[in-house]
Amino acid sequence: MTHGLVEDRPPTTAAVPSNALVAAAARALAAINYVIVILAAIALIFACVVLTYSVLTRSIFHSATYWQDEAAVFLIVGATFMTAAAVQSTRGHIGIEAFVGILSPLANRIRLTLVDVASFAFCAFFSWKSWTLAHEAWVDGTVSNSTWGPPLVIPYFLMSIGMTLLCVQILLQIVASLGRTKNS
């Protein structure tokens, strides 16, 4: 495990899109990711406050709490999925680095592109299934089985949007990789 930049994880500016439209889309997604990361940080802080309140309420007042755990899970799930594209934009997801040192730079670029294509295929399928779940939850009015019973469309919708943004991010990285400009 390494900490910091590795040869296969260049700064986000390394793959400069040669197409102005792709570059504009990458800038727009970066701005969206920035806002989402701030909102996700607030959601995580709120989840911590909710869980702390739940623990204190149960232990000090011996009062039953029925909504706090589920609300915190919804916030954490939303923050996790919604920030996936921001993490991918820095290639911050867990990766296997065993081949980085033994492959040539060209082979590493090809390897990264192939991994991106495979990741895109998986995430596109996951995104499609997430949108299917969100649609079914919306149409059927599905709620959780808890006493509180919040609508399940909330986490499914956040999951769907997050996976869609991740697909867009990976697709932009693939396009930038294939149309990479060489900096001499």
Image: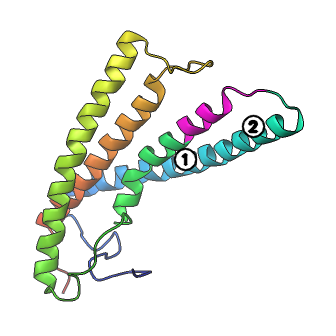
Dot 1 falls on a residue whose secondary structure is helix
Q: Is residue 88 left or right of residue 34?
A: left
Residue at image location 11% in from the left, 72% down from the top? 110
Q: Quadrant of residue 113?
A: bottom left
Name the residue type under label 2.
Answer: Ser
Give the residue number, with chain letter if any, for mark 2: 54
Q: Is residue 78 left or right of residue 63?
A: left
Q: Quadrant of residue 65?
A: top right
Foreground label between 1 and 2: 2
Give the residue number, with chain letter if any, for mark 1: 40
Where is residue 135? Give x, y as percent.
Answer: 32, 20
User: Which stretch did the figure color magenta?
Assistant: 64-75
Q: In the displayed structure, would residue 130 be above or below residue 2?
A: above
Residue at image location 77% in from the left, 26% down from the top? 64
Q: Nearer the viewer, residue 167 or 70?
A: 70
Q: Nearer the viewer, residue 139 or 60?
A: 60
Where is residue 128? Give x, y as percent.
Answer: 24, 33
Asked whether residue 18 appears in the rendered view, the answer is no
In space, the residues marked 1 and 2 are separated at their CA atoms by: 21 Å
Residue at image location 24% in from the left, 70% down from the top? 15
Name the residue type under label 1.
Answer: Ala
